[in-house]
Image: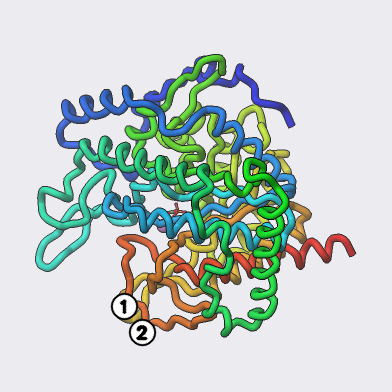
């Protein structure tokens, strides 16, 4: 395992933040007005960074620990943030549920939980089709608020580069509020587990265990608050990082900068960009961009994929095999996991590549109901997580994280869970413009079940 090697940085490899523009690119519509695009790109280049290089380095070190089983990555948030979701309520609810999940996991697993939101920049969506029929007309597909508008008319579905600027502003507002909530110590829900809404868990077979865990977290917090001077209560400050899919490379590359006294280039729009399953091609624009930055990066892997290409990508993005640099996020779905994941792990291990293995149990498990509503079943999600733990145990590798599409709101987008949301209930509060998310209750329940699973394998290991 070698440390970060500045020699592998951009200059040596003939890379620049915009070298991706010389490569074929997927999932990016043409902007119709190049002059406007240049204007907005240059404007974005001048704005102050949203995150700092030292936060990015700190996260990379934590992900390295997770790859060794000393910490666990909890990454989650909306499939796609919308500009309209940039509200106090939406942000607080997501932060609250992620913090609660991390407390549950910390309590059960006894290792530090690395919290990374899909937030403050998750505005772009890869799509399977480039257009859709609405009524009698065919429109360009909605690609996320950073590119076009969900409202369908001929104008608003056209890619509009002024949205790059709006995305920056919305991300900045979101981050500013997140920082206030996590650094100021004023976030009451963090200190009062008794505010957690637990009634729904009554229907879960683990309710008693769950309730006693929350009581024990409450006592631990009370105890700490009682004996430590307030400046020393570490709960007053919690670590929270951001991530988004680096899909609209104009946005990410305009915010990719050099920083004083450090080698290399940093994407300062987010801590952890990732590349999606549809854009991870070794000789194309997205991987070209990714290979030049110092941030830790995620790479999604699901069907269809070519094993040789995945190995090539990892080597390209992380030539010095730096720990914490690459998080390999498998998303095979319950149908393919048993056959595909062992092959992927074997290939990565045979090459001696240092990656953090994380599991996205969402994207391989989407299906449409009879009414054509896109959903996911809680049990399928759980199945993929359990299988992933099992496969890693059998192969003597470590599952060090999960990647979820979730929200702190009471939406009805995924079926199942302790409350047994049925397909009939999906219409009650289905809000997502893209993929279905776990709601507040489903997210907490899943965190608890993931922690139980993790413990089960730990206990087997030590026997
Ligand atoms: C996503 O994470 O929202 C997504 C589209 O995932 P994938 O690239 O794995 O399909
Ligand atoms: Co999604």
**The residue at label 2 has a CB less than 8 Å from ligand 2:** no
Q: Position of residue 27 (x, y in %)?
A: 33, 45
Q: Position of residue 429 (x, y in %)?
A: 33, 73
Can residue 129 be seen in this snapshot? yes
Q: Which residue is the site of mark 2?
A: 424
Q: Is residue 385 depicted above or below 68 in this figure?
A: below
Quick check: marks 2 and 1 in contact, CB under 8 Å?
Answer: yes
How many angstroms separate mark 2 from mark 1 (CA)? 7 Å
**Which quadrant does the C terminus fall into?**
bottom right
> As rendered, which of 241 and 404 lies closer to the eye?
241
**Which quadrant does the N terminus fall into?**
top right
Q: Is residue 376 depicted above or below 168 in this figure?
A: below
Q: Which residue is the site of mark 1?
A: 427
The quarter holding residue 135 reads bottom left
Ligand 2, by image quadrant, is bottom left
> As rendered, which of 344 and 146 lies closer to the eye?
146
Q: Tag 1's secondary structure?
A: helix
Instruction: Give me the residue at 49% from left, 23% from top.
Output: 265
């Amino acid at each position: 395992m070698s440390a970060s090697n500045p020699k592998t940085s951009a200059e040596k490899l003939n890379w620049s933040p915009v070298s991706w523009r010389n490569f074929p690119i997927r999932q990016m519509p043409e902007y119709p007005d190049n002059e406007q695009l240049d204007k907005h790109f240059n404007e974005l280049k001048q704005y102050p960074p949203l995150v700092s290089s030292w936060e990015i380095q700190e996260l990379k070190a934590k992900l390295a620990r997770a790859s060794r089983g000393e910490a666990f990555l909890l990454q989650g948030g909306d499939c796609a943030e919308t500009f309209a979701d940039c509200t106090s309520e939406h942000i607080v609810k997501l932060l609250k549920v992620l913090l609660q999940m991390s407390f549950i996991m910390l309590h059960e697993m006894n290792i530090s939980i690395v919290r990374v939101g899909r937030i403050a920049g998750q505005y772009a969506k890869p799509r399977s089709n480039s257009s859709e029929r609405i009524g009698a007309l065919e429109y360009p597909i909605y690609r996320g608020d950073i590119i076009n508008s969900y409202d369908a008319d001929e104008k608003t579905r056209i890619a509009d580069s002024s949205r790059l600027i709006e995305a920056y502003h919305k991300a900045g507002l979101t981050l500013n509020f997140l920082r206030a909530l996590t650094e100021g110590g004023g976030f009451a829900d963090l200190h009062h587990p008794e505010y957690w809404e637990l009634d729904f868990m009554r229907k879960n077979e683990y309710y008693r265990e769950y309730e006693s865990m929350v009581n024990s977290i409450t006592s631990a917090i009370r105890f700490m608050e009682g004996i430590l001077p307030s400046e020393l209560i570490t709960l007053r400050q919690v670590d929270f990082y951001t991530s988004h899919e680096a899909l609209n490379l104009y946005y990410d590359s305009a915010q990719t900068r050099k920083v004083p006294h450090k080698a290399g280039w940093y994407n300062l729009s987010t801590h952890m960009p990732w590349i999606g399953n549809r854009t991870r091609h070794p000789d194309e624009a997205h991987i070209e961009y990714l290979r030049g930055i110092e941030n830790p990066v995620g790479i999604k892997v699901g069907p269809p994929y070519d094993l040789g290409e995945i190995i090539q990508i990892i080597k390209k993005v992380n030539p010095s095999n730096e720990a914490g640099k690459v998080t390999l996020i498998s998303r095979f779905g319950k149908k393919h996991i048993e056959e595909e994941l062992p092959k992927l792990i074997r290939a990565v291990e045979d090459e001696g590549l240092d990656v953090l293995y994380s599991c996205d149990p969402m994207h391989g498990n989407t299906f449409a109901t009879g009414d054509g509503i896109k959903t996911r079943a809680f049990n399928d999600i759980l199945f993929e997580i359990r299988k992933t733990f099992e496969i890693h145990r059998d192969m003597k590798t470590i599952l060090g994280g999960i990647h979820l599409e979730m929200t702190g709101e009471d939406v009805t987008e995924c079926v199942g869970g302790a409350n047994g949301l049925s397909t009939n209930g999906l219409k009650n509060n289905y809000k997502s413009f893209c993929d279905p998310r776990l709601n507040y209750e489903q997210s907490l329940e899943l965190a608890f079940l993931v922690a139980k699973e993790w413990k089960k394998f730990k206990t087997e290991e030590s026997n």
